[in-house]
Image (spheres, rainbow, N blue to C red):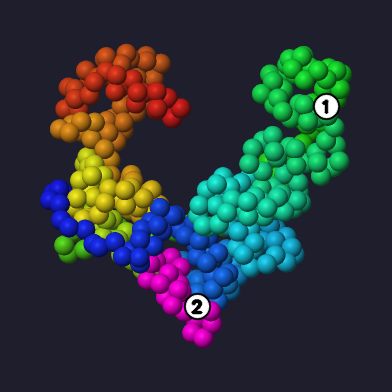
Amino acid sequence: MLTTTPRLGPKLTAGLAQAISLLSLTAGELAARLAVEATGNPALRLVPPAEGSWRPLFDPEGVAAPSGSLIAHVLAQIAAMRLGPRPLAIALALAEGLEPTGWLGPTPAAVTRACGVAEAEVLAVLARLQRIEPAGLFARSLAECLRLQVEAAGDLTPAVGAVLDHLALLAHGDLAAIARQTGRPEAELTQAARLIRGLNPKPGLVFEGPMPPPLPADLLAQRAPGGWEAVANPAMFSVEVVAGRGDATAAAGIGRAVDQRQRIAAMVGTLLVRHQAGWLEDGDPAPLTTQALADMAGLHVATVNRLLRGVSIRTPRGTLTLRALATRPIRSDGPAAETVKQRLAELLRRAGEARPSDAHLAAQLQAEGLPVARRTVAKYRAALGSRI
């Protein structure tokens, strides 16, 4: 178990500040940020992982995308655009976020934050990627996916636009309501609705090849003579300085920041896996506040929160963000919230159609040594509703 004895944190140097700024980035986002940095500094080079199947799309040696896959098609189309280095890095960051449906997973704002560029740059590149065939790729919503398809076909009439602006009403077949709200004749809207229903809402699924492998975890949880520890994943990429090109001093600073990010992540990850040793060995998770973790690590709680969001770890119980290992207690002397949620889910599944009351479930949890208020049961039950 962790103690919460505070100790003096490290002095916030420029290098440490840069490392901290990288903590909230996932592996893919970090690769995107460094790729953009490298476009302006030839002294900085991304090195593909020594082992593992994942290679960032920003790997300068190229990516062997599965033949016939959506990503192989998109990468070929991006190559044909002959973008400059910086727009290319942004395009690849957007491509990294493609879902199997062909939709864009992360928001442009998230890609902007990851790449460290202006959002206008991301939106400009996204507009170009949305012209890739088949139309509808890189859409951010169903309406945008369908709009891209009718625009490409030259079918975006006022009636079609009106229906696309009211897809919720179309889903209920209420063309009369669309007519009332838009002033368009219902006969026009009926024809537009027929055209829209013939479109493909998931254009990425026309490709049969597999998607690229998932991103690797930043850290690996492993047993050691002194207990559990978190170590850097050798399947992650690294950076190196290319002598005689660009700003070697700035590139070296970025390299140190990446290394320091990894050291901070491994230190906090080790504290967490040792605290959760029982859970890793099929027991219950132990409650832990981020403040207690920050005190133990000698870091500011804001720094710890950044790290918990961005850094992932592969454990015997799956690949998780570090946030999942810092489970909050329901109250200072109470059980871990995740323990209660897991047990509540089991009780609800077992009850089936009976649907016991919140009060009954609270009493049952109390009898099992998990004291929790009825209103807390109601909150967790609502959150579990879609999964039970």
Q: Quadrant of the C terminus?
A: top left
Residue 350 or 127: which is nearer the viewer? 127
- Asked if residue 133 is positioned above or below residue 258 in the image, the reply reads above
Q: Is residue 246 shown in magenta?
A: yes
- The residue at the point 37 percent across, 15 percent down is 355
Q: In the image, 347: left or right of 142?
A: left
Q: Which residues are magenta?
A: 235-258
Within 10 Å of disc 2 (Cα), the crowding (few <14, some 14-19, many 20+) is some
State which quadrant residue 145 falls in. Answer: top right
- Asked if residue 349 is positioned above or below residue 297 in the image, the reply reads above
Q: Is residue 130 shown in magenta?
A: no
Q: Amino acid at mark 2?
A: Asp
Q: Position of residue 292 (x, y in %)?
A: 20, 46
- The residue at the point 70 percent across, 65 percent down is 83
Report helix, strand or loop for mark 1.
helix
Mark 1 or mark 2: name the one nearer the start of the chain. Answer: 1
Can residue 382 be seen? yes
- The residue at the point 74 percent across, 17 percent down is 181
Q: Position of residue 146 (x, y in %)?
A: 73, 37
Q: CA distance from mark 1 to mark 2?
A: 55 Å
Q: In the image, 385: left or right of 331?
A: right
- Disc marking residue 247: 2
Can residue 319 be seen? no
Q: Position of residue 255 (x, y in %)?
A: 41, 71
- Disc marking residue 65: none
Within 10 Å of disc 1 (Cα), the crowding (few <14, some 14-19, many 20+) is many
State which quadrant residue 362 falls in. Answer: top left
Q: Amino acid at mark 1?
A: Ala
- Disc marking residue 159: 1
Q: Position of residue 6 (x, y in %)?
A: 15, 52
